[in-house]
Image (spheres, helix red, strand yellow):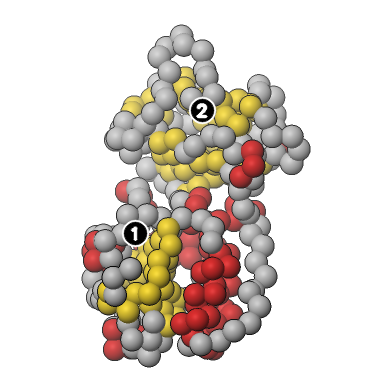
């Protein structure tokens, strides 16, 4: 790849866990820049590794910098970013990039994205998306001039690695800006398709429930079902999840109990289903018991 200097981070709209970091302060350090956004399941599944590398190599001179560039409008709210940073135990510096200035300076296009920068400020490697963990750690070691066994990492909860062998359903955005596979009224719900029931307003980013009792139904083939949700007015909205028309029982996700009950409070990714047995084609239905729910994107694992 072309030898490029790491762009300045001066355009950050805010910093978390640190005072602003200038190029002079980073000179002489190996830097790992991690672009993320708080609702991204792909980033969530990589974060255990980034966190572990930060802790394992900081005494060797590694500086990890998270750059939070929001995908959805509600992710611009600094309180949400601060909460996500706390919940994920992120203690390394985070540059808040609400204006996409750092994203543009790096010419970045993905969440997550890792940029590996040597002590002279030259970007030596990059990686987009999940995977390649051992190779990435070896690159960090090479830049630091150390050699040791890779750190042991196990993602838990929503950070757990996807069941790639049985994952046959792609992410699905619900707003008209990026939505696909929306069935026509009366059409049978096919695999990897979703449907709305009730009174909804379809916006560019999301669908918004206008009256209590509306549902979203999805036919999927995956171990996990996640849905990015928010409530614009900051309301607490109870919801119910059914799996093939029944309470999910042991297949409930982290944000749902065995009876399928959950509450939408914060804007974030909600885990609705995590199956512990056979993974097969199934139908998930989420019904909101109050108006105002905003649904953005389904992701699977």
Q: Count residues near mark 2 (Cα–Cα under 10 Å), then give few for <14, some for 14-19, many for 20+.
A: some
Residue depicted at 48% across the width and 61% down the height? 84
Q: Position of residue 162 (x, y in %)?
A: 61, 48
**Residue density around tag 1, few if under 14, some if 14–19, many if 20 or more, within 10 Å:** many
**In which image quadrant can residue 49 be found?**
bottom right
In the picture, the quarter occupied by the C terminus is top right
Image position of 81 with respect to 203: above or below: below
Viewer-nearest residue: 288 or 227? 227
Which label number is shown at residue 125? Answer: none
Identify the mark at residue 192; answer none if there is no mark: 2
The percent coordinates of residue 211 (x first, y second) are 42, 25
Mark 2 and mark 1 in contact? Answer it, CB < 8 Å: no
Q: Is residue 180 left or right of residue 6?
A: right
Instruction: Choose top left, top right, bottom left or bottom right for residue 230.
Output: top left
Mark 2 or 1, closer to the camera: 2
Residue drawn at the location 35% of the way across and 48% of the way down: 72
Depth check, front residue: 226 or 229: 226
Q: Which residue is mark 1?
A: 69
Left or right: residue 10 versus residue 123 is left
């Amino acid at each position: 790849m072309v030898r490029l200097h790491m762009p300045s981070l001066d355009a950050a709209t805010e910093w978390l866990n640190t005072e602003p970091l200038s190029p002079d302060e980073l000179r002489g350090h190996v830097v790992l820049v991690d672009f993320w956004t708080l609702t991204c399941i792909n980033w969530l599944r990589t974060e255990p590794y980034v966190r572990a590398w930060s802790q394992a190599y900081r005494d060797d001179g590694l500086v990890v910098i998270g750059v939070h560039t929001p995908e959805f409008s509600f992710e611009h709210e600094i309180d949400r970013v601060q909460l996500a940073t706390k919940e994920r135990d992120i203690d390394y510096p985070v540059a808040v990039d609400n204006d996409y200035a750092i994203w543009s300076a790096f010419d970045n296009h993905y969440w997550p994205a890792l940029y590996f920068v040597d002590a002279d400020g030259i970007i030596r490697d990059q990686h987009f998306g999940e995977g390649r963990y051992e190779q990435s750690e070896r690159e960090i070691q090479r830049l630091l001039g150390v050699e040791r066994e890779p750190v042991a990492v196990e993602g838990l909860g929503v950070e757990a690695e996807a069941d790639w062998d049985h994952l046959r359903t792609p992410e699905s955005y619900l707003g008209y800006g990026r939505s696909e596979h929306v069935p026509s009224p009366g059409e049978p719900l096919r695999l990897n398709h979703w449907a709305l029931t009730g009174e909804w307003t379809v916006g560019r980013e999301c669908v918004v429930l206008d009256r209590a009792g509306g549902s979203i139904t999805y036919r999927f083939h995956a171990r996990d079902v996640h849905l990015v949700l928010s409530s614009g007015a900051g309301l607490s909205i109870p919801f119910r999840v059914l799996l093939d028309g029944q309470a999910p029982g042991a297949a409930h996700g982290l944000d749902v109990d065995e009876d399928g009950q959950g509450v939408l409070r914060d804007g974030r990714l909600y885990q609705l289903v995590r199956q512990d047995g056979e993974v097969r084609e199934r139908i998930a239905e989420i019904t909101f018991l109050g108006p105002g729910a905003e649904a953005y994107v389904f992701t699977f694992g």
